[in-house]
Amino acid sequence: MPTSFSRYADLLADAARRVRELMPWDLRDHLAAEPSLVVLDVREPAEFAAARIAGSINVPRGILESSCDWDYDETLPLLAAGRERAIVVVCRSGSRSLLAADVMQRMGFTAVASLKTGVRGWNDFEQPLVDDTGRAVDADSAERLLASRVRADQRRPR
């Protein structure tokens, strides 16, 4: 029985040692140079519907592993057949995407990276976001949608 445990921050720091992280300007440049680049958004469907990078695909973090492999209800052929394909994983802030990219590397994905600042950073860099209808989401609305909502009862006791 292990006597120590990791906190979320420890898991993120560990994954950051293995995963290549891109900044929003790097992603913008990669998208311009490489139209086949897959932007994989691992947020929940409601988050994805509200504001996302145009052309991104949504696979919630909870079904990522089965979406990346064959023979599961969640299998996404684009991912299951794309272990060498260039993929940038995104989420709201860059944390879920970092862990997701780490898992994908362990599953054999060789060209996967994480967007360090997430969709929030993409919006802060004044890059376009769209909603589930394809309409542009203005930066101020996106900022409100992407804001952290940590309640008082969720904060570490002092």
Image (cartoon, rainbow, N blue to C red):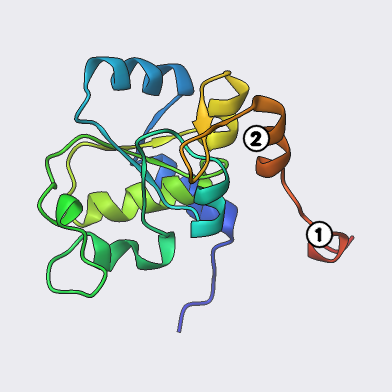
Residue at the image position 24 percent from the left and 49 percent from the top: 105
Q: Residue at x 52, y 41 (%)?
A: 131
Q: Residues within 10 Å of mark 1 (few under 14, many from 20)?
A: few
Please name the residue that numbered disc 2 is placed on.
Answer: 142
**Would you say 82 lies left or right of 98 here?**
left
Image quarter in which the C terminus is found: bottom right
Left or right, 9 with respect to 91, comes to right
Amino acid marked by disc 2? Ala
Residue 128 rendering spot, x and y as whole percentages: 51, 24
Mark 2: few/some/many CA within 10 Å (<14, 14-19, 20+): many
- SS type, badge 2: helix
Q: Position of residue 69 (x, y in %)?
A: 17, 64
Mark 1: secondary structure: loop
Q: Identify the residue under disc 1.
A: 155
Specify the quadrant that holds the N terminus.
bottom left
User: Label 1 sits on what residue type?
Assistant: Arg
